[in-house]
Image: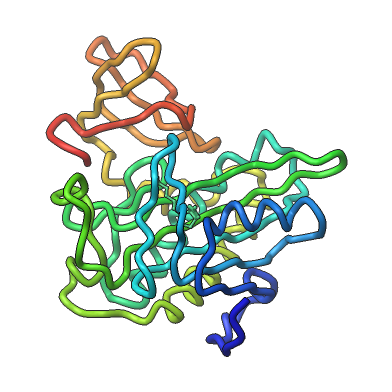
Amino acid sequence: MRERSFNEPGTAWAGRSRQSFAVLDSTNEYAKQLAAGQSVHGLLVTADAQSAGKGRRGRVWQSPDAENIYMTLCLEPEFAAERAAGLTLVMALAVSEAVCEVTGVKPGIKWPNDLVMNQKKICGILTELIPFADHYAVLIGVGLNVNTTKFPEELIGTAGSLKTELGKAFSRERLIAAVLKHFEAFYAQYEKTGDLSLLKGRYEDALVNLGKAVRVLDPKGAYEGTAVGIMVSGGLLVRDSAGTEHLVDSGEVSVRGLFGYV
Ligand code: BTN
């Protein structure tokens, strides 16, 4: 574990306890091991590089050294596990607001939790729920491309970073502190109702899909429609051409713009 000083996050609990590494296989995997043996609520795990960074749907998350943020915030919520799905949207909102605070430019959110700037994905979030006998843990892994400028062939055109999109480098530590601050405030709102009631408006303000044509890549059959908002559970409401509204709420369902990634 790396010994060094960090920016004081200015939070009551989120990230006040932190484990930081030069390299981990995956901050989510490390957090998972910790969560099995101790209380981890509020613990932040960070790494400068990941040797086996995990993306959604079994993909690899490119994790070059010392350029980006790779972090996992661990939670042990008091509310029922069925209500935890919305937390991934809460983190997306927190990262969006944190980036806005630090850079002056607010990224959009592509439902449910990708952050985009100039139609490029700059941040992905992988949330894992780990059940234990008497409680559960939620591990929210955030990969935010901060200062990276080189991308593998297959990501050129769809991936970006704050540096590629805004033309200058930013402090990873300042961004982390801002994410923790915003997450803690939004989590308090989420806890009050156990859903996104108090955050829905703010989330929809950032939602790039809102009012746009989307293709829902449902394994049971793809369909097209218009994204008309989110439900307080975190699901996306899509209205098809017949006027029927569909609730897209599975993390395994992918939503694409008709003309590209967004
Ligand atoms: C996605 O596919 O969009 C989600 C990417 C999530 C990447 C982050 S980086 C920190 C944490 N540790 C991992 O192994 N994955 C997440």
Measuring from the top left, give residue 218's x and y in whole percent. Answer: 37, 19
Q: On the image, which quarter does residue 42 sit in?
A: bottom right
Q: Reply above or below: 45 against 51.
A: below
Identify the coloring. rainbow
- Would residue 82 appear left or right of 140 to someone viewing this image? right
Q: Residue at x 51, y 52 (%)?
A: 90
Q: Reply above or below: 167 against 235.
A: below
Q: Residue at x 52, y 57 (%)?
A: 25
Please say whether residue 205 is visible from this viewpoint.
no
Please say whether residue 60 is visible from this viewpoint.
yes
- Would residue 188 appear left or right of 174 to someone viewing this image? right
What is the tally of numbered marks visible in this picture?
0
Of all residues shown, which one is farthest toward the right?
134
Q: Residue at x 29, y 14 (%)?
A: 243
Q: Quadrant of the N terminus?
A: bottom right
The one of 25 and 167 positioned closer to us in this rendering: 25
The one of 43 and 67 positioned closer to us in this rendering: 67
Of all residues shown, which one is farthest toward the bottom?
5
The one of 234 and 62 positioned closer to us in this rendering: 62
Measuring from the top left, give residue 8's x and y in whole percent. Answer: 58, 86
Q: Residue at x 67, y 51 (%)?
A: 32
The one of 228 and 111 positioned closer to us in this rendering: 111
Q: Reply above or below: 248 against 167.
A: above
Q: Quadrant of the C terminus?
A: top left
Measuring from the top left, give residue 212's x and y in whole percent. Answer: 21, 34
Measuring from the top left, give residue 127's x and y in whole percent. Answer: 54, 46
